Amino acid sequence: MKRYFLTLLVLVGAWCARAQSLEECRRLAQEHYPEIRQYDLINLAEQYNISNAARAWIPQVVFSGQATYQTATPTYPDALSSLMQANGIEMVGIRRDQYRVAIDVSQNIWDGGQSRANRAIAEAEATEQRSRVDVSLYDLQSRVDNLYFGILLLDERVAQTEALIGVLESNLARMRTYYNNGVAMQSDVDAIEAELLTARQTLGQVESSRASYRRMLEVFIGEELTLDNLERPAMVEPNSRISARPELELFEAEEGKLAAQREAINASVMPRFAAFVQGYYGYPGLDMFESMVSSTWTPNAIIGVRMSWNIGAFYTKKNNLEKLNTAEQQIAVQRDVFLFNTEMQMVQEDGEIARLRLAIEDDDRIVELRRRVRMAAESQLENGVIDATDLLRKITDETNATLSRSTHEIELLQAIYRLKTTLNQ
């Protein structure tokens, strides 16, 4: 039981650590972002649209009923009516009030490719919508990165400020000893103590900013950050080639939608063929002579093949196709603009990486020199060569150099991962 409990603790600890890496924060942010639910809604809408397109091949049934009164109806010629009356046959003719309850069933034989085009449009629209969500979630990655590296920078500031406080506390204790021995003045003690209080005040402000950044990141990922310090990402060099960005896939999806719309326009000018059955119960029936003799309701039916051809679709076909061609050219321009801006961004980020690498090459030497100067100043203060103000200046220089080195390292990491994001790597 104890071994099982320890194993569980290790797994939970490993999960917590993993949950606070950059990649895991990106994944959690995407899963927690409300727009992720759009995928399910888009899939449902696509299924409904495709189902509607397929139902064009289901037999169409129309029920109808009508009651009419007309000013004239078919009658026998007067000579024939007189002859029949002479033989004792009364021909009343068709009544002017007529009634009908009907059902019309039709089955598509060929719709000119319209249902296939509607299905293609439904699929293309869904693909375009999913690509837009992909772009939105891809942009979310940069927002998470900014928060993550912002926290790392604040972590470094906290660490350097705590180190500064440690140095100041040590020197304050030493200065108080000098003052008690009559070697230093009260103003020297006050100067170091004031600097110490300022450093502690700065530490509180930085910790407050870090807590705010951590809270914002927690809102993004939907979980609490359990570790005090986030994991620093590995220094992975990006390739120089750009991968398939979601924006490029969106352009392709928009072109696919235009292609489906072109197919629908071509289908709109094609003739349609359908088989049909019409049946009705009413008066008069199809047998007009019988209806002239009797006003009884009768069942009637017609079966056949119907062709329909909307010639008017030819009037707008050319303009509609030209509109699609114009839209394709606009997409091509948008793609070229995106690639141009991306290329410019890559050049800028490469330059920033090169600048930070050069800065870091000198940082270690600068920090070492500032540390030696500060240690020498402490010795000089002990011997009465300099005062507390000079020592504080040396301490500040060392702190700034150390903070600058740490800042450059994290900024280099951030620049590299920013370039990786631009390249979609």
Image: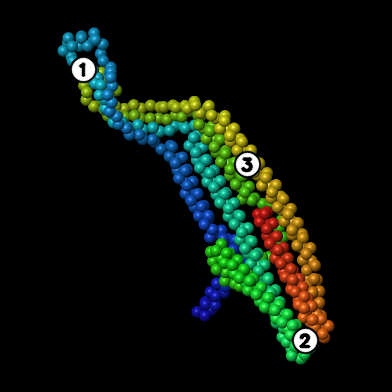
Nearer-N-terminus badge (2/3): 2
Query: On the image, which quarter does residue 177 sit in?
Result: bottom right
- Disc 3 marks which amino acid? Ile
- What residue lies at 72% left-to-right and 50% top-to-bottom? 344
- Whether residue 300 is visible here, answered yes or no, is yes
What residue is shown with label 2? Answer: 184
Can residue 299 be seen in this snapshot? Answer: no
The residue sitting at 65% across, 64% down in the picture is 149
Q: Quadrant of the C terminus?
A: bottom right
Marks 2/3 in contact by CB < 8 Å: the verdict is no
Q: Residue at x 68, y 71 (%)?
A: 157
Give the camera-side residue of 216 and 114: 216
* Farthest residue, direction bottom: 181
**Type of amino acid at the residue the image marks with label 2:** Ala
- Residue 268 spot, x, y in % from top left: 50, 31
What's the residue type where badge 1 is placed?
Val
**Which numbered marker is on residue 92?**
1
Name which residue lies at 56% across and 58% down.
Answer: 30
Task: Tell us which disc is closer to us: 3 or 1.
Answer: 3
Residue 269: give x, y in percent of width and height: 51, 29
Which residue is at the front of the view, 142 or 239? 142
In front: 8, or 229? 229
In this rendering, the answer to whether 418 lies above or below 214 is above
- State which tag comes first along the sequence, 2 or 1: 1
Which of the labelled discs sits on residue 331, or is there none? 3
The answer to whether residue 377 is above or below residue 130 is below
For the residues labelled 2 and 3, the Cα–Cα distance comes to 76 Å
Q: Residues within 10 Å of mark 3 (few under 14, many from 20)?
A: some
**Could you classify mark 2 by the number of other residues whose Cα lies within 10 Å: few (under 14), some (14-19), or many (20 or more)?**
some
Q: Between marks 3 and 1, how big is the CA–CA gap?
A: 73 Å
Residue lying at the far right of the rendered structure: 385
Say which of marks 2 and 3 sits in front: 2
